[in-house]
Image (cartoon, coloured by chain):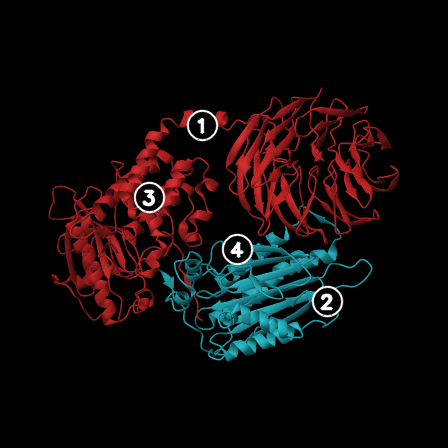
Chain colours: A red, B cyan
């Protein structure tokens, strides 16, 4: 099939396609013969044909009808030009008007007639309307190929121009105010007697803001008198038109959709003509403009429903919703303050250690194990928080434990790796290293893998405690190694991420710009991790090539978690990020008050993560909306663990908390 | 709607040289197989599609992961603009990808954060193709689908209405969206597939290489599993055959090339209304 491209948005749209395809030609035909064929009463002025023109457009100073002196071109589309003109019948004052000239370039007689009829229709519709937001029509005349419509000149600027001149975002209140005014004029049009008028081409460039800050609706070029059940031509502007308009259906709720599209554009600053058609729901406004209230976004989203029956039933209904927003605004501040109170979660139990709990808990057979900076590894009853036993080392336990073969393994800042029997709470063995251990152990084929600040990765026999081999990195290793597909992956504080075979031989190395403290996650043949260089990386497990990388605005110390095809990870920029593994793009991000150096845990559609602001956050995994947060009295670096619908997490306030999911 | 309607080029032109360069790979040894086809069809007078296939394997004690680059484009625009656009696009994209990925692989053992990611390279390759086609072929445009297979990853960049599918023994998974107005309306339930087939705007793309400006490029990331394959094709194939027919033909063919030949024959039998192009990669036991 031959393909056609949609035009660039700068090409002005408008006439489109009829059901029988005849008007296909409308948009494409070059200027044909100029044989006159005017289907309307015309008043012909002798000499009008010799008006001075450049590129087919009237030049400044030209006088039409011995009455209108052209002052400037206001705009030009494919089939028409709009001029600013002075009405010479009022010589003593400057009475300005806008003159729209239609050029009929179609050669097909049927199409020509349709073009003329469209122009006549615009004039006739305008002549019957009387509303402060709709420009008055003064005159309408035609001769030869050209028809002219003289309308009120509006001093002001259209919203598209205004938007492009606005550096930041338009204030929400201002946009809501405009939206209410637009609803007013739509209410007038849609309730017009004898038949409703559908505007069909609502968009920022057809909305003028006059000098009194009032919204005026311009260009009724394709407005249509609505007759129920009638199918018309497909017409409108790509990007703003509702889906049903492509089936030739024009009805009042189509204008509601276009208003929603317009508001979306004004607030998000994303031009819908440059985006995939009907993709508003995939591009929520908050992604580009986080300042817009959720309530307004909901109203806009409602007006943009694909199915007209799901939208506001009328402009009145939409106006009521917008007015409701205004009155609600007064109490917003109070409501926001409430959210933290309402969202506050009560702990099921909490257990006080004697120093900070930075280690991440692990739950095994109804027992939760966690390390603390008070040198101890604790074993607590997972349900009640009752103390079972603790094992004291000679240094803080920052390492997050792992349990296997009836032993709990963990490192200590005292430089040793410990294996403690979980039944007897007695030491099975220790394995000394030459550096402090902040790394967390990982099991692999009967061996415990752990890194040390002595730059070595140790593979220690889990039964005997003897190292089978070591691998020398270039800097301290503080992450938890990951294993899969006959290889081990881990980062060092020098910024390298290593892939090492199970025999301890290097397979490949990737150099990030700064430290890799984040523990790698293996998913879809990728190694995913963060770096202090602010990037999140996804490398091919086999080759070490970066398949994608994603930049945040702070160090990424947090380790990734995955659910379905979404990767979750925090950053010191305060955001929790959700990234789609199928394209490497952001799904959503949500902001904490502090840094997110804790690693997220995903459970049953929710993501749990801690922040240095002292909170534990629970957000919806699909949308990133906050479900609840829990306040502790110290930074939460520890990563939550979820088991039996309880979230376990440590805090800098020395406590381990158990929270309901 | 201001669509630029473009007329068909009516004269025959030689197929893109690059599309003739590749040969099908070894058969039956468990290695990946590659087949491709690019035919004029029954009703056109020229082939506006372009296909480019590059495969590189290295054996040795410290061997590099195999590299595969498969590019398919379907041009549009009158006065031969379509065929020029598609050929220019596949070459421009391939040049950029080889330079930033394969040549780097040959030179360096170690990867680092300064190198662009595979995703970035493919996106940029499409932007390059867009810039070149926009300036060299005014009035022309093309779809462009690039699939890079490296290590255990498949990275696909895509603009237009050619398609990429993952091929499984009993079904196809379409991994690209058609950037056509009608497909979008079908996705939204506003048009049925039957209505779409006859819609007056069925050939209207809202995104294509050659539009000028910065292009939004779709990227698809997948990992390889042993029992599946990858199919790229122009609408001259997917518009003529159902997904069920395509799966059955691929399943029955002994090699990837035989499958491509059989797909082209079937599309021609079904009417061959447009140029027919396809690239099929099979991974019997990984890449």
Q: Which comes sooner in the sequence, label 2 or label 4?
A: 2
Q: Nearer the viewer, mark 2 or mark 4?
A: 2
Q: Nearer the viewer, residue A125 or A58?
A: A125
Dots 1 and 3: beta carbons under 8 Å?
no
Left or right: A541 as drawn, with respect to A3: right
Q: Are marks 1 and 3 on the same chain?
A: yes
Q: Are marks 2 and 1 on the same chain?
A: no
Chain letter behind tag 4: B
Q: Nearer the viewer, residue A43 or A523?
A: A523
Q: Which of the image's four quarters has the C terminus of chain A?
A: top right
Bin the neighbour count of mark 3 within 10 Å (Cα to Cα): few under 14, some 14-19, many 20 and up.
Answer: some
Please give the label number shown on residue A225.
none
Coordinates of residue A525 in the picture (x, y in percent): 68, 52
Distance of label 4 from label 1 (alpha carbons): 39 Å
Q: Which residue is mark 1?
A: A336
Q: Which residue is mark 3?
A: A159
Distance of label 1 from label 3 (alpha carbons): 31 Å
Chain letter behind tag 1: A
Coordinates of residue A625 in the picture (x, y in percent): 50, 37
Q: Are marks 3 and 2 on the same chain?
A: no
Distance of label 3 from label 2 (alpha carbons): 59 Å
Please give the label number shown on residue B217.
4
- Give the secondary structure at mark 2: loop
């Amino acid at each position: 099939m031959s393909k056609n491209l949609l035009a660039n948005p700068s090409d002005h749209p408008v006439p489109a396609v009829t059901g029988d395809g005849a008007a296909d030609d409308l948009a494409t035909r070059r200027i044909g013969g100029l044989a006159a064929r005017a289907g309307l009463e015309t008043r012909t002025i002798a000499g009008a044909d010799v008006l001075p023109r450049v590129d087919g457009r009237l030049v400044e100073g030209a006088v039409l009808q011995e009455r209108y002196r052209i002052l400037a071109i206001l705009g030009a589309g494919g089939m028409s030009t709009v001029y600013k003109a002075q009405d010479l019948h009022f010589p003593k004052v400057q009475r300005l008007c806008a003159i729209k000239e239609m050029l009929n370039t179609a050669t097909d007689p049927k199409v020509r007639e349709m073009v003329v009829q469209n122009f006549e229709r615009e004039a006739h519709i305008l002549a019957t309307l009387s509303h402060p937001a709709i420009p008055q029509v003064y005159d309408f005349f035609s001769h030869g190929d050209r028809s002219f419509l003289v309308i009120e000149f509006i001093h002001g600027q259209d919203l598209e121009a205004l938007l492009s001149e606005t550096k930041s975002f338009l204030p929400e209140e201002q946009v809501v105010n405009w939206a209410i005014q637009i609803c007013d004029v739509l209410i007038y049009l849609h309730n017009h007697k004898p038949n409703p008028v559908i505007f069909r081409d609502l968009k920022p460039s057809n909305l003028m803001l006059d000098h009194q800050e009032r919204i005026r609706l311009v260009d009724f070029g394709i407005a249509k008198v609505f007759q129920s059940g009638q199918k018309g031509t497909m017409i409108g502007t790509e990007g703003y038109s509702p889906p049903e308009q492509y089936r030739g259906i024009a009805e009042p709720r189509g204008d509601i959709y276009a208003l929603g599209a317009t508001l979306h554009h004004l607030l998000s600053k994303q031009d819908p003509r440059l985006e995939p058609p009907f993709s508003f729901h995939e591009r929520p406004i908050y992604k580009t403009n986080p300042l817009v209230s959720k309530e307004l976004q909901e109203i806009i989203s409602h007006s943009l429903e694909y199915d007209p029956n799901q939208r506001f039933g009328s402009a009145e209904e939409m106006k009521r919703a917008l007015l409701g927003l205004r009155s609600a605004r007064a109490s917003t501040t109070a409501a926001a303050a409430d959210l933290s109170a309402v969202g506050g979660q009560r702990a099921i139990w909490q257990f006080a250690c004697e120093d900070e709990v930075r280690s991440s808990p692990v739950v095994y057979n109804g027992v939760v194990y966690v390390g603390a900076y008070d040198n101890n590894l604790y074993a607590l009853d997972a349900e009640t928080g009752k103390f079972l036993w603790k094992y004291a080392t000679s240094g803080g336990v920052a390492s997050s434990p792992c349990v296997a073969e009836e032993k709990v393994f963990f490192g200590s800042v005292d430089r040793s790796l410990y294996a403690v029997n979980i039944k007897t709470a007695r030491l099975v063995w220790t394995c000394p290293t030459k550096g402090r251990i902040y790394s967390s152990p990982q099991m692999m084929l009967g061996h415990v893998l752990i890194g040390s600040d002595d730059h070595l990765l140790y593979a220690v026999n889990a039964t005997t405690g003897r190292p089978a081999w070591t691998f020398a990195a270039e800097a301290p290793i503080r992450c938890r190694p990951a294993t899969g597909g006959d290889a081990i992956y881990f980062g060092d504080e020098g910024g390298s991420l290593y892939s090492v075979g199970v025999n301890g031989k290097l397979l490949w190395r990737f150099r990030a710009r700064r430290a890799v403290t984040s523990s790698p996650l293996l998913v879809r043949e990728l190694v995913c991790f963060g770096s202090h260089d602010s990037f999140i990386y996804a490398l091919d497990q086999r080759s070490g090539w970066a398949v994608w990388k994603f930049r945040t605005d702070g160090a990424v110390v947090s380790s990734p978690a995955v659910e379905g095809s979404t990767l979750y990870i925090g950053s010191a920029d305060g955001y929790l990020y959700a990234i789609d593994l199928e394209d490497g793009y952001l799904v959503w991000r949500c902001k904490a008050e502090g840094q997110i150096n804790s690693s997220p845990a995903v459970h049953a559609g929710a993501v749990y993560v801690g922040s240095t602001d002292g909170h534990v956050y629970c957000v919806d995994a699909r949308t990133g909306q906050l479900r609840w947060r829990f306040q502790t009295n110290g930074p939460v670096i520890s990563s939550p663990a979820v088991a039996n619908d309880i979230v376990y997490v440590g805090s800098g306030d020395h406590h381990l908390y158990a929270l309901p999911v | 709607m201001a669509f630029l309607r473009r007329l068909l080029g009516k004269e025959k032109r030689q197929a893109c040289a690059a599309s003739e360069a590749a040969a099908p790979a070894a058969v039956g040894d468990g290695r990946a197989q590659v087949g491709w086809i690019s035919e004029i069809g029954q009703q056109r007078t020229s082939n506006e599609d372009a296909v480019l296939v590059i495969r590189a394997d290295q054996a040795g004690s410290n061997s590099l992961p195999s590299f595969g680059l498969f590019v398919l484009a379907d041009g549009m625009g009158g006065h031969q603009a379509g065929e020029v656009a598609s050929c220019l696009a596949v070459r421009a994209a391939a040049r950029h990808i080889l330079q930033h990925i394969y040549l780097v692989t040959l030179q360096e053992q170690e990867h680092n954060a300064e190198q662009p990611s595979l995703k970035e390279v493919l996106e940029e390759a499409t932007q390059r193709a867009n810039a070149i086609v926009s300036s060299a072929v005014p009035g022309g445009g093309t779809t462009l689908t690039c699939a890079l297979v490296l290590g255990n990853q498949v990275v696909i960049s895509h603009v237009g209405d050619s398609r990429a599918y993952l091929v499984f023994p009993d079904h196809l998974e379409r991994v690209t969206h058609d950037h056509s107005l009608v497909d979008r309306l079908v996705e939204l339930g506003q048009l049925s597939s039957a209505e779409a087939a006859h819609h007056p705007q069925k050939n209207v793309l809202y995104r294509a290489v050659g539009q000028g400006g910065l292009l939004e490029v779709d990227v698809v990331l997948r990992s390889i599993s042993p029992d599946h394959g990858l199919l790229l094709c122009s609408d001259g194939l997917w518009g003529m055959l159902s997904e069920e027919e395509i799966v059955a033909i691929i399943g029955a063919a002994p090699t990837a090339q035989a499958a491509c030949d059989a797909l082209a024959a079937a599309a021609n039998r079904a009417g061959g209304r447009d140029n027919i192009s396809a690239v099929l990669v099979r991974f019997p036991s990984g890449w």
